[in-house]
Image: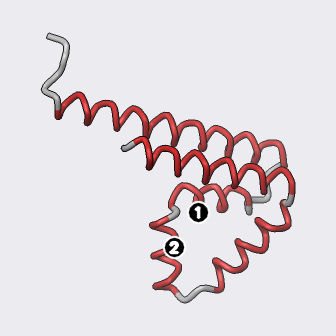
Amino acid sequence: MSFTAFGVMVVEWLVFIAVLLLSPATLDWVAVWFRRLPILAKIVVALIFLPLALALWVWRRPWLLLERQVIIAIMAVLWCVGGLSVGALRRQARSGGGSA
């Protein structure tokens, strides 16, 4: 993953978490909007914004508020750290580096 893509991902997660904390009703509105999309549009949006679509799914679960917030925060951190790790491994493979 490039640093630009990583930066976009971090900004997406920060916006999602800010909306989660400051205006949870907005997330409910987005979930309703997403559900009303035609199936093809729903698939395209879900694929483009997969981590956020999964976080939105978690948000709509009937779990305790704190549980949902913690799960979403963990997802955000793991998704970003995982993206950085994959990018570092790809750069290392391209440069022919490795520890032997």
- Report helix, strand or loop for mark 1: helix
What's the residue at 78%, 74% (across, down)? 29
- Amino acid at pointer 2: Val
Going from N to C along the chain, the mark reached first, 1 or 2, is 2
The span from disc 1 to disc 2 (Cα, nearest Å) is 8 Å
Count the marks: how many? Answer: 2
Circles 1, 2 touching at the beta carbon (< 8 Å): yes
Residue at x 37%, y 44% (from the top left corner) = 2
Coloured how?
A: secondary structure
The picture places residue 4, in percent across and down from the top left corner, at 44, 47
- Asked whether, in this view, residue 36 is left or right of residue 44, the answer is right
Residue wearing tag 1: 53
Q: Nearer the viewer, residue 93 or 67?
A: 93
Quadrant where the N terminus is found in the figure? top left
Residue plotted at (45% across, 37% down): 82
Specify the quadrant of the image occupied by residue 84. Answer: top left
Relative to 68, say whether 33 is above or below: below
Image-based side of 86 in relation to 21, left or right? left
Q: Residues within 10 Å of mark 2 (few under 14, many from 20)?
A: some
In this view, the residue in front, 66 or 16, is 16
The image quadrant of residue 70 is top right
Which quarter of the picture shows residue 20? bottom right
Tell me where residue 54 appears, x and y as whole percent: 58, 58
CA neighbours of label 1 inside 10 A, class few (<14), some (14 to 19), many (20+): some
Spot occupied by residue 52 in the image (x, y as percentages of width and height): 59, 58
Q: Quadrant of the image for the C terminus?
A: top left
In the image, is 33 to the left or to the right of 10? right
Find numbered disc 2 in the image and state the secondary structure of the residue it sits on: helix
Depicted 27 relative to depicted 76: above or below: below
Amino acid type at mark 1: Ala
Q: Which residue is mark 2?
A: 45
Find the residue positioned furthest to the front: 4
